[in-house]
Image (cartoon, grey):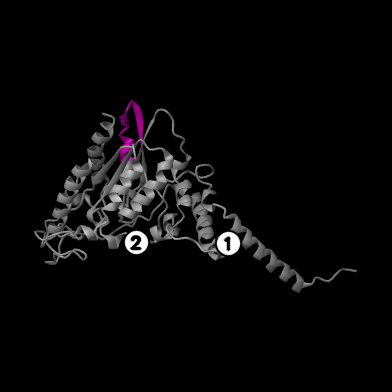
Amino acid sequence: MKSEINFTRVFIKGIFLFIIFNLVVALWQPNIGKFSLYNSIFTGRERLPFGENPKQSYNLSLFDLDAMFTSHVIHGTEKTEYEFRVIVIGDSSVWGTLLKPEETLTGQLNEMHLSACGKNVTAYNLGYPTISLTKDVMMLDYTMQYEPDLILWMTTLDAFPIEKQSSPIVEENQKQKTFWEKTFIGDRRAWADLIRLQIYGVMWSATGIDQFYPDNYEKAQTDFEPDESYHNFVKPNLDKNLLALNMLAEGFNIAGEIPLILVNEPMLISSGNNSDIRYNFFYPRWAYDEYRNMMNEISEENNWQYVDLWDILPANEFTNSAIHLTPAGEKILAESLALYIEGSCQ
């Protein structure tokens, strides 16, 4: 006689096993982000995962730094004695909005076949599309495990206001998870993101596409209202108490003996309506001028290497933002920074 299946008993056993599985995951706490098919089955990504339309960009935004970095080409590249490793951190201008990987700052630097300290320079794009010093420091701290020889920290005034320091990726990597959040169910978003990232690795490897490139986009604004406001600051001074200046010191402290060059990145300087009041969408002239003076003073006081490249590009070398460059603009920037890279051993 065939034994009848007791579906109630099977269901209860299934629930029990699922509960046990969740408890094991919570207690074991597997570092799921370390599991990656990139740099083995799939080609390592040239920039950190970020994307708002995965089906078109074969990319997505996630919060797990381990998963992000293990998908990056730097994780799968063993450093040799002949490599001079340069890491570049910063915002979306470094990441390369609207640019193909080879058109970005790091892509252009690598095309120049530079040498430093008698070694071949290889630059790695570790920018991420959030304007925040705190985010940059978090990325820098994680990156130190990859043994950089030189760090280029690209930044701009809008990364400094304290109100800009909080972002989802920073918050998610600072909070302590509860026991429930450590279970498979509680942490299901991280598991789902990791699986999706692996799936998109198929198309990334096949196409080299990691962001959506629209046929048309709105050009960066060049005409403005007669508005001199900038966040919560009051003309004519930038209140240092409202700026995350401590993050600069933290970044240099993390770098330690590794040379770090702080770079004030290029920005669009408009000649349109009310351009005598505002340089661009981001900055009224008084605030940005005060920022540049402040950065020069702070860098001299702390003996930091600081390079100010704010005005090296004409307005037509920007795309959809006052800080997003064209490929030609990135080439000019790369040529300007090449001098500092090659001279970093002197």
Q: Which amino acid type is marked by label 2?
A: Ser
User: Residue 173: which disc?
Assistant: none
Residue 274: quadrant of the picture: bottom left
**Is the residue marked by circle 1 packed among few (<14), some (14-19), or many (20+) residues within 10 Å?**
many
Instruction: Please report the residue visible at 40 percent of the width from the left and 42 percent of the height from the top.
Output: 144
Q: Position of residue 206 (x, y in %)?
A: 47, 47
Residue in view at x 30 percent, y 53 percent: 133
Residue 62 lies within the magenta run: no
Please state, as top left, top right, bottom left or bottom right, where the C terminus lies in the image. top left
Q: Crowdedness of circle 2 by 10 Å Cα count: few (<14), some, many (20+)?
A: some
Q: Is mark 1 on a helix, strand or loop?
A: loop
Determine which residue is flagged by label 1.
184
Q: Position of residue 97 (x, y in %)?
A: 32, 53
Residue span colored magenta: 107-122
Among the two numbered marks 1 and 2 on one chain, the one whose residue lies closer to the N terminus: 2
Magenta includes 119? yes
Do residues under tags 1 and 2 come within 8 Å of each other at their CB atoms?
Answer: no
For the view shown, which residue lies furthest in the top direction?
A: 118
List the residue tagged with mark 2.
166
- Viewed as shown, does residue 11 lie left or right of 279? right
